[in-house]
Image: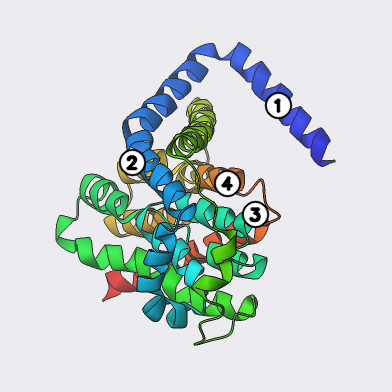
Amino acid sequence: MKRTLYATCSILFFISLLAFPQSAFQGASTGLLLWFHTVLPTLLPFIIISNLLIHSSAIDVITRIAAPLLCRFFGVTPYGTFVILTGFLCGCPMGSKAAADLLKKGAITRQEACYLLSFCNNTSPMFIISYVIWQSLRMPGQTLSLLLIVMLTPILLSFVFRRIYGIPAGTCTGSSGAAAAATENMSLDACIMNGFETITRIGGYIILFSIIISYAAMIPAAPSLLSMFLLPSLEITSGVTMICSKTLPEGMKLVLTLALTSFGGWCAAAQTRAMLQDTDLPIVPYIIEKLVTALVTSLFAYGYLLY
């Protein structure tokens, strides 16, 4: 059934490329420019450096510094703290890549990797500040408040997800030395090539989703559910622009935009799945957890408006 559906969708997409070449070209151009001007210079350096850190003893230095605070607070191993730092600071899908890489090295367990994925694969703070808050919402005076809503929600939900995955509370499970034997050096050339492979894969998903958005824009009178929720949720950058350009109350724009920022979009979910493909980590629980995070973020945003 799954293979049949995949084949059918592939054939329909191929036919659409032939039937609507102009829209496909426009969507592909938009996606390529977005990837080249924004994603490539933003993520590629982090991917290369992350590879160097994970495959050298440098990660032990970082985890030794971060472990005393983050280990006990989140109930993870010292190597898990690296995923937390990467997932919150570097942007999606870096959190999932770090979790997958450390799982393949044997530095963290599958249980811990699933738990880390539930809250550590988020939109980067710089993107939230510069693009979402300043450029799209045009609320520079509320930068700190809005940033805290998006960043603190997954942290709060981590205590819920911790119970679901059976992670002991308030304990530092394992030690940095436990995975020291798994450390294997990767040359700089290998780190760079892995970085380009990863960023190219991400770019492919951005282009495909941009084409789909271009096709959807051809619908003359799209239902409100489609135009307000489904289309913006496909890709975060285009989605935030769609929401903020609509004639909606400013409060609704704020709630929808922060919810989408927290979720990351279906394109980010597809990128995350690509990062996990060499592991047995499931993608469906991750998507459900991101949707729950988006819902809670929207509730906090609504409460912020009332306050």
Question: Going 51% across and 26% down the picture, which residue do you hit?
Answer: 211
Which residue position holds label 1? 10
Q: Nearer the viewer, residue 225 or 157?
A: 157
Mark 3 vs mark 2: give the one in front: 2
Quadrant into which the N terminus falls? top right
**As displayed, is residue 37 above or below residue 141?**
above
Residue 275 image label: 4
> Which one is earlier in the sequence, the residue at label 4 or at label 1?
1
Q: Secondary structure at mark 1?
A: helix
> Which one is earlier in the sequence, the residue at label 1 or at label 3?
1
Characterize the local packing of mark 1: few (<14), some (14-19) or many (20 or more) Cα atoms within 10 angstroms: few
Residue 51 image label: none
> Which one is earlier in the sequence, the residue at label 2 or at label 1?
1
> Which one is earlier in the sequence, the residue at label 4 or at label 3?
4
Q: Say if mark 2 contacts mark 1, CB within 8 Å.
A: no
Q: Nearer the viewer, residue 55 or 114?
A: 55
Q: Secondary structure at mark 3?
A: loop
Which residue position holds label 3? 283
Which residue position holds label 2? 42
**As displayed, is residue 80 above or below residue 71?**
above
> Which one is earlier in the sequence, the residue at label 4 or at label 2?
2
Q: Secondary structure at mark 4?
A: helix
Q: Nearer the viewer, residue 74 or 302?
A: 74
